[in-house]
Image (tube, rainbow, N blue to C red):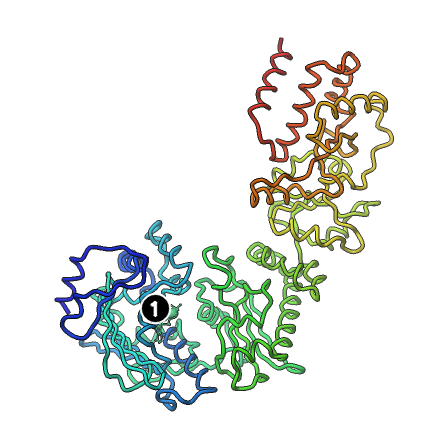
Amino acid sequence: MSEKKDKKTTKAAAAEKAAPKKKAAGKKKSNAEQFEYQAELQQLLHLIVHSLYTHPEIFLRELISNASDALNKIRFRLLTDKDVQDPDAEMNIKISIDSEKKILTIEDSGIGMTRDDLINRIGTVASSGTLEFVKQLKENKNNVDGNMIGQFGVGFYSVFMVTDLVTIETRHAEKDGKGYRWQSDGRGTYTIEEIDKATRGTKISFRLNDASQEFTEAHRIRHVINKYSNFVDFPIFLNDEEVNKVSALWHRQKSEITDEERGEFYKFISNDYADPLAHLHLSIEGVVNFKSIVFIPNTPPSPFFRPDEEKSLQLYSNKIFIQDDCKELLPDYLRFLKGVVDTEDLPLNVSREVTQNSPTMIKIKNTLVSKVLSFLEDMSRKEPEKFRTFYKNFGNIFKMGINSDFSNRDRLINLLHFSTTRTEGEETISLKEYTERMTEGQNEIYYLSGEQKELLLNNPNLEYFRKKEIEVLLLTEPADIFIVPSIGEYDKKPLKSIDKADIDLKKDADDESALKENLASALIDVFKEALGDKVEDVIESKRLVDSPATLVIGKEGMDTQMEKMMRMMQQDFAGGKRILEINTSHPLIKNLSRLNIGSSTDPLLRKSIMQIYEGALLMEGSLKSPGDFIKRMTEIMTEATK
Ligand code: ADP
Ligand code: MG
């Protein structure tokens, strides 16, 4: 072994992305072939060994979890295919400790690995999240919790926290398969050689390093198993004594299960390291029969994973694991939920095709969705704080259901929550609450969209609403901009953007301060002439109180925020023209009218018009040439201070 090691340390760290490289050197002595890890994996391994100190015991959880996965796979296969290696072998996990030699062995009778599996599954990083994990490890070495490793699909490597050399001996369930030994010190390379292995499954053994001697104690190992792996659905033996006695949690009475047990179960199935936000325990009998525990995580989905890498519900049939992440059980907009569904209604020889096309699955899905929505409805009423956390974490995924699940559309709309001109801090309200406190004579629901609440509150289009004490929804979530306009109306009241020209505003009849009609229309003509085709139209405003002017969108136009997003996606997106509304009661507009009476070509008048227009663009965040704006402002100020 030491001979091999020397060779590894002297070799240059050829960091190549490509698939594993065979090293001729390793071939000499035995029939072992030597391979190099992918560059990313080398980095990961280096970091695991040098900067992951917290929770070293999770290596055991990860190895047991892999053994359990492997056993689930063979059990599933045996439902339809007995023609495998050792069809009658007992399915279990055996852990043994040799305290003298400090050697730990974990053996399972699962599906095993082929030579290709050893190269492609053990030697290669598969998940998009892994590189992010590597980055996090590098950036804040001391704050990354080893506990997180399972999430990133690299759990196996946590074993290098407690040892310097790992041996895997494995034989795949395939009838004419062969046995292989894989070995690595977790630095740059690993070796694979063919061996005689009589039985199906995988055996992993290693000598505990000096820092990890605690794991030579059986009681310590038992403690770790009870903490992390109690829910493994196969017997776990520790030095021949069975240590896990827990049966399927979802088959037990709700009242018998402690929060702690449930929390650990959640972590076990989800790979999350925090407790869940909420859970729902179902036992459904009738048209369709199933038991289920569904969890809402407490943390938002990781931005590092593609949505298809997130695992949602596991499917069981009569307590037998059928599928991880069964996509047929939940619609996309609820895929952030974690948990299990166990049904007696599927035939025992379930295959992917069966789960994809079965009417039973559709019934389960419909029932689940309905129960989850009721649960959320209850939560929004009885536990607003919790609901807010849920909404903050998953609202943007969840809302998408409005445009895809038409049978539950109304219920989903009722669950929407918004910040408004009247809510404070984190507080949000539903559309129902909004309509219940509408002002007298108000027939429409108003909204304004933008990036931040603080900026929206300065929008001049709000002035009228503020004066009339009409509440306006403030949409700051990108998803809202797609969802809200598509709702159309709620409780027979149309939803309208206050950015638009066609809203039902009532100008105060007693407004004596405004310009007389002929003066106003003469000034408007000059505005139109000066702005030319920059705007669609110039009109007198009913909505402004304190500001001289504002830009609004024509009836057919796109929401400002939506337009901004389109522009981000499509560089040359032109967007619609705006309508400029002017406030004929504003002193500035009245001064301009006076200049206009003097001469409609007065340069200060023209300059001011341009400045008003660009000021309004600046306000909504779409002024493209601040240079001209500032130059003109300087000129006007110079004039004013003359
Ligand atoms: P993950 O379990 O998230 O896929 P791991 O790093 O824990 O990531 O394991 C990588 C892969 O190695 C597994 O997906 C599996 O294919 C294979 N593997 C690991 N341990 C075993 C085992 N005991 N039996 C069979 N395959 C295994
Ligand atoms: Mg794993």
Q: Secondary structure at mark 1?
A: helix
| Quarter in which the N terminus is drawn | bottom left
Residue 383 higher or lower than 617, as above or below: below
The residue located at (58%, 31%) in the rendering is 624
Q: Is mark 1 within 8 Å of ligand 1?
A: no
Where in the figure is residue 281, as x and y percent of width and height? 58, 73
Where in the figure is residue 37, as x and y percent of width and height? 28, 62
Quarter-wise, where is residue 387 in the image?
bottom right
Q: Determine crowd level at label 1: few under 14, some 14-19, many 20+ residues with C-alpha closer than 10 A.
A: some
Residue 628 higher or lower than 621, as above or below: above
Where in the figure is residue 164, as x and y percent of width and height? 22, 66
Quarter-wise, where is residue 380 in the image?
bottom right
In this view of the protein, which residue sits in the foreground, 354 or 365? 354
629 relative position to 16: left or right: right
| Quarter in which the C terminus is drawn | top right
Q: Say which amino acid is labelled 1.
A: Asn
Residue highlighted by disc 1? 120
Furthest-bottom residue in view?
88
149 relative position to 408: left or right: left
In this view of the protein, which residue sits in the foreground, 578 or 210? 578
Q: Is residue 53 visible?
A: no
In this view of the protein, which residue sits in the foreground, 424 or 285? 285
Furthest-top residue in view?
642
Where is ligand 2, by quadrant? bottom left
The residue located at (76%, 38%) in the rendering is 501
Where in the figure is residue 593, as x and y percent of width and height? 77, 18
In this view of the protein, which residue sits in the foreground, 94 or 583? 583
The residue located at (84%, 45%) in the rendering is 441
Quarter-wise, where is residue 7 in the image?
bottom left
Q: Is residue 222 visible?
A: yes
